[in-house]
Amino acid sequence: MTAIKSTDRAAAATSGSAVLKRFAPWIIAALFLLFLPVIFASGSALTIMNQMAITIVFALAYNMLLGQGGMLSFGHAVYMGLGGFFCVHLMNMVAAEEWFLPIPLLPLFGGIFGLAFAMVIGFFSTRRAGTVFAMISLGIGELIAACSIIIVVFFGGEEGISGDRTMGPEIFGLDFGSQIEVYYLTAAWLLVSAAAMYFYSRTPIGRLANAVRDNEERAEFLGYSQRYVRLISFCASGFFAGIAGGLFAINFEILTEENLNLVTSGTILLITFLGGVGFFIGPIIGAIFFTLLQTVLSLYTEIWQLYVGALFVLTVMFFPGGMSGLLFMHVRPYQLGKLNILFLPYLKTFLPATAAILGGVGFLEIAFHAKNASVGDQMMTLFWLTFDSHGLIPWLVCVLLAIVGGYLACRMAPLLRDAWDEANSLVAN
């Protein structure tokens, strides 16, 4: 009897540790979001973090289509935008005392509206995957973007629709007039939405979406309708995209045509690819990285979009797994205990590559300043150095850095490739 009780206690302890291990990342994420404003307490930092959280929810929702279901959409901003417009109208109805709705519940109604619209569009667009689905999504995106200018009653025309989140009923004394209150509301919805999307990907229907993505004929042969599997994934993605739209409405209190046009749809595609479509954490990394580029890098250069575009092209060409794929590539060398082999080859390759990149960036910045500066404004500051953009020496330095650095990086690339093969080899050193 004692042995049985000891076995039961051991099994309970093992089960408890397994549950703790399963939910530990979410607990850590919750604590991180809770204490993040303590580290970055300024108003601008809170605004950036709120924008980052909204982008993460939207990118994760898009990844439900592209990463899990294999459906490339060029118009997914429609569902975020419609959810946001609907929430702004609800916000105005609450302000006019036509409705009683707590502000924290607005994203849920945005998600429901996004879901309803996704059900209508998905009913006919998910009949086919691949190019057909992509073209239909593009057409729907352009159609709704055009309607946003024509249907002024709902979309507000070119000026858009604005609201006031502080006019809603107070919840525990909170009117969400301050950025810190909005941050914690956005962070809570981010955590709930991310957890829901993660556990959805582990459900049978989420696994079926992966099966249809990989081999739709085999899924049909096993008795599963590829169309309905895609439809369910499409609707779930539209729901969470609508939640992102509701959070956008609460944070910025205005929705315009820009929130549902092709540019926004292309941006979320870029973000997802940068982070990595094959990993759940990929869109999170991509959203954080892109938001920092958009908000921080844009303060220092006017051609930041050129750098983002070049980064996207390089990622698609050389790192199709995105940033997360690049990180997870090192799991195997780590497990084999050979990660240290890569340190010196990385250093020898990336130092000249960094010099080449700095040279190329310097050349572009000098060219842009020389072309667009006002008459008589020849001095510019780059990399904390002030110099004459019309002088010959800065141009020569940048060209020299780019050529020499690129040449040395190319010379070191074969050594890095050999070190990578050795680090992934099962043969002991």
Image (cartoon, rainbow, N blue to C red):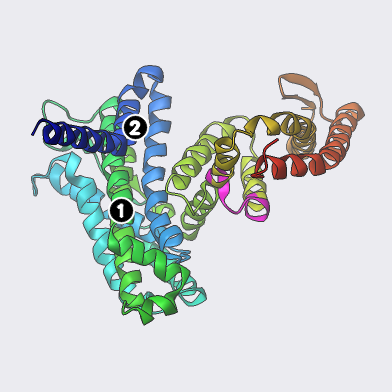
Residue range of the region highlighted in magenta in the rendering? 315-324
Quadrant location of the C terminus? top right
Q: Position of residue 196 (x, y in %)?
A: 27, 49
Task: State whether residue 161 appears in this view.
Answer: no
Residue assigned mark 1: 240
User: Which residue is pictured at 75% across the width and 44% down the height?
Assistant: 417
How far across and down, in percent of the image, does residue 185 sit?
Answer: 25, 34
Lateral position of residue 312 relative to residue 394, left or right: left
Q: Is residue 215 or residue 333 the one in the foreground?
A: 333
On the image, the x and y values in percent for residue 413 come to: 79, 42
Task: Of the two numbered discs 1 and 2 on the same chain, state the one appearing first in sequence.
Answer: 2
State the SS at label 1: helix
- Left or right, 162 with reference to 373: left
- Going by the image, does 396 lie left or right of 272? right
Marking on residue 29: 2
In this view, the residue in front, 50 or 86, is 50
Give, as a three-letter code, the residue at label 1: Phe
